[in-house]
Every structure is written in C-alpha cells, then in structure tokens.
Image (tube, helix red, strand yellow):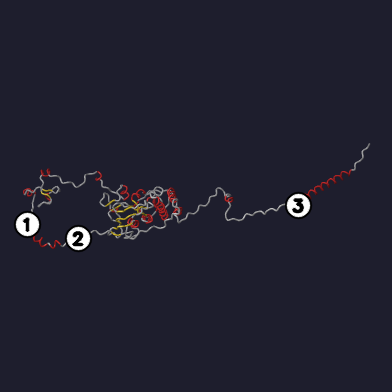
Amino acid sequence: MSRPRRDPNRRRKIGILSGLSCLGCGGLALVVLLGLGVIGAVFAPPQPPARVPAASAEPSPSALTTAPEDAVSPTPTADPSTALGALSALPVQERGSKTGYDRDSFGWRQDVDRNGCDTRNDVLRRDLHDIILKRDTQGCVVLTGVLSPSPYSGAEVAFDRDNGAIDIDHVVALSDAWQSGASTWDKATRQQFANDPLNLLAVESELNRQKGDGDAATWLPPSTGHRCEYVALQIAVKAKYGLWVKPAEREAIERVLSTCEGQPAVTAALAWPAPGEGDGAREEPAPPTEAPPTEAPTTEAPTTEAAAPETTTAEPTTEAPVSYASCEEVRAAGKAPIRDGDPGFRAAFDGDGDGVGCESSSTRTSEPARERTSAPEDPEDEAPASYKNCDEVRAAGKAPIRAGDPGFRKKFDRDGDGVGCES
C-alpha cells in the first residue's frame, strides 16, 4: 500500500504562519509593557524635587577633611610691635669666637654725647632717686642716691659712692656682643654700643657680677616679674646693632615671653637727664666754715699785754741761745746724748739719722731703739701689686680700686673721683 504524497509547500506555509504568530505575540507583549508604563506614570506619587546645595562662605567639615594630610598651614606673621615679633626677625646663629676680645676696646664710660659727664654718672642720674651731687663737678658726679626698684630684684638699694653697692650693667654684655657679631665693628661703633642708654641699667653689684657675660640662656633676673622687660630690652639692643641670637638663647627668650603674651617691643631708650639734673638731684652742702675769732680777746688785750712783758722779758734773761760746735762740747756741757728738738741740736750730731746725736757706743747699746714705722716684712709686700687693666683688678677681687690702694693707676679713674674700675 503506497503512502499518500506530501505537499511540499505545506511546510513553507506552516513556517510562515508560525513566524507570524510569534511576531504577533511579541507585538502584543510590547503593547502591554507600554501600557503598563503609561499607567505607572499616571498613577505614581509625585517625587520631591532634587535639592541643590546652597553656596556657603564657610567650608563644610567634609571639605576640610579632603585636604592632603601632609599639607602645612602657613605660619602666621608675628606682630612686629611685640617683643616676640621683634625676636622672630633676629638671625639665629651659633656663638662666635671670643678671640681678640678686649673690654677696654669698647671705650666704656666715654663721654660719647659730649655733655661733659662720663656715662656711668649719666646712668646713675637717670636711674637713681634722691640724688646728691658732688660739688665742683659741673653737676656730673653722683655721691649718693636710691635705686628703687631694682630692675633685676625689685628691691630698694641705697647707693653710696664708697660702698660700691651699685654697678652699671650692659643688658647685652660686651663679651656676648663680641661673640654675636661685634667682632667686626669699628672703634666708633663699639664705643656707641658700650655707652648707649638703651643697653645700660643701674643694678646691684652682686647681681651684675653673677650675670657676667651670660645671655638669656644662662642668666635671668631673679625677680620673675622683671624678666619680660629684661629680654625685651635684649631683643631691642640686638636688633638695633644687627647682632644675632644663639639657638638656646632664642628658646630661653621665647619661654620667658610665653608668660607675658603681647609684651610690647622696646623702641626707644630712656634718655638720661642733663648735668645737674635728676630725680631730687641737689649738690652736697658746703663744708662748715671756721668761725672768725671772737672779739672778746681783743677787748681784753690791754690786760693781757700788760702781763705779757713780765713773761717775755724773763725768757731772754734766763738762758741765752745754746750752740755747740761739736759733740765734745755737747758732752762737756753734760747734754749728750742730744735729741732732735733739744737746744743746740744739729743734724751733724746725728750720724745714724735716728733723731739722737752725740751717742757714745755705750749709749747706743743702752738707748732703746726708736720704734720702726714700717710694717713687718711680708712676702707679698716684696712684689708690689700691678694691674694692666680693670679686668685684672676685678679678677683679683680689688674692684673698685681707690687712690692709694696697691696697684692703683690714674687711668683706672676716668672721672677723677679717686675711685677706679667702677662698673
């Protein structure tokens, strides 16, 4: 039995119909999706509008944290009107050499302002109160006064020219200046620096010698309440003369200034008064003059004169002036040994210069020796003291040295008051 023949076009028709049906299903699905989208858009709740951040003058915290971790904030510029600001402008360098330093080369106490007075007395008249001036010194030399308060201790200190209780301190010591740039200065600049009122203060001698040539890293005033002003002065002096500060010195000054924030910078020195002036300055009183002889003796003169002839006339008759030609005559007259002051004594009779003449050998032996006026021998007396300069006097502990003291030299006494090597 033979199978019926298949129509060859039948498969083609079925494929086409299948394709059309799939296309129809896809189109239907698309229509459904589009419909759902439209319905969702219509019935979906409204969305709030997106916020736009408002512009702000201050950055947000998140913005601050976005900066790189290694970023360095710029250092604020210090206020130049403060001591700390002035310090920041000073160069910092290690201490220089002291080779060649000589205190005398600075000409301390020279009358650089030509007012007729040496610098030491100028400062004393400026810093002391209740001042007594020495007569006949054109109002220059201070004899006594009171320092109150001391810029280093805050105490009240009585000054007397003979007690040496007060020195004049260089706020920036001469040796420290030499090691901080002054070694290159000429003579005029050194003298100006050493006698600048900005760099000078009357202080207790004891504290001045404790300080020596130290800077702020090695010495500060014992009164903590005076330290800020002290370091402010040091800054001003170093700034004026172009000196540098050492690293340790700068750190010490910064520590002091941290206790007095805003300490003003020192911009000018307190000038000293003119000769003859000062707080309570007055000249010492003149010494009392001897009273002239009273007239009483002159009124009684007639009675005195009447009695006088009886006394005066008796003397010539009692004994004629004595004169001996030789010791033999002295001995013959029974006047040996004869002493200086005895009638008839002559220097020719005193062979050994002891004031006793015409001594026999036995008399010399029995006569007590005249008392020696010289001091007992002392090994130190054999070598008289000699000092080259005031530094040597101070090193020997003999400052101030006075006229008549061993080793005194006129050049030590610059103001001619008989006292030398005064600080």
Upstream in the sequence, badge 1 or badge 2?
2
Query: Label 2: which residue?
Result: 291
Q: Nearer the viewer, mark 1 or mark 3?
A: 3
Q: Is residue 10 above or below residue 129?
A: above
Label annotation for residue 329: none
> Do the residues under discs 1 and 3 have CB atoms within 8 angstroms?
no
As shown in the figure, which amino acid type bears the numbered disc 2?
Answer: Ala
Q: CA distance from mark 1 to mark 2?
A: 34 Å
Q: Nearer the viewer, residue 5 or 315?
A: 315
> Do the residues under discs 1 and 2 have CB atoms within 8 angstroms?
no
Q: Position of residue 260 (x, y in %)?
A: 44, 52
Q: Secondary structure at mark 3?
A: helix
Q: Residue furthest right?
A: 1
As shown in the figure, which amino acid type bears the numbered disc 3?
Answer: Ile
Residue in the picture at 19% in, 60% down: 291
Looking at the image, residue 204 sits to the left or right of residue 21; the answer is: left
- Quarter of the image containing the N terminus? top right
Query: Label 1: which residue?
Result: 314
Q: Nearer the viewer, residue 251 or 64?
A: 64
Q: Nearer the viewer, residue 231 or 96?
A: 231
Looking at the image, residue 29 sits to the left or right of residue 72; the answer is: right
Quadrant hosting residue 6: top right
Q: Residues within 10 Å of mark 3 (few under 14, many from 20)?
A: few
Looking at the image, residue 348 sits to the left or right of residue 106; the answer is: left
Quadrant hosting residue 242: bottom left
Query: Label 3: which residue?
Result: 39
Upstream in the sequence, badge 3 or badge 2?
3
Q: Position of residue 325 (x, y in %)?
A: 8, 51
Q: Residues within 10 Å of mark 1 (few under 14, many from 20)?
A: few
Q: Nearer the viewer, mark 1 or mark 2?
A: 2
Quadrant hosting residue 195: bottom left
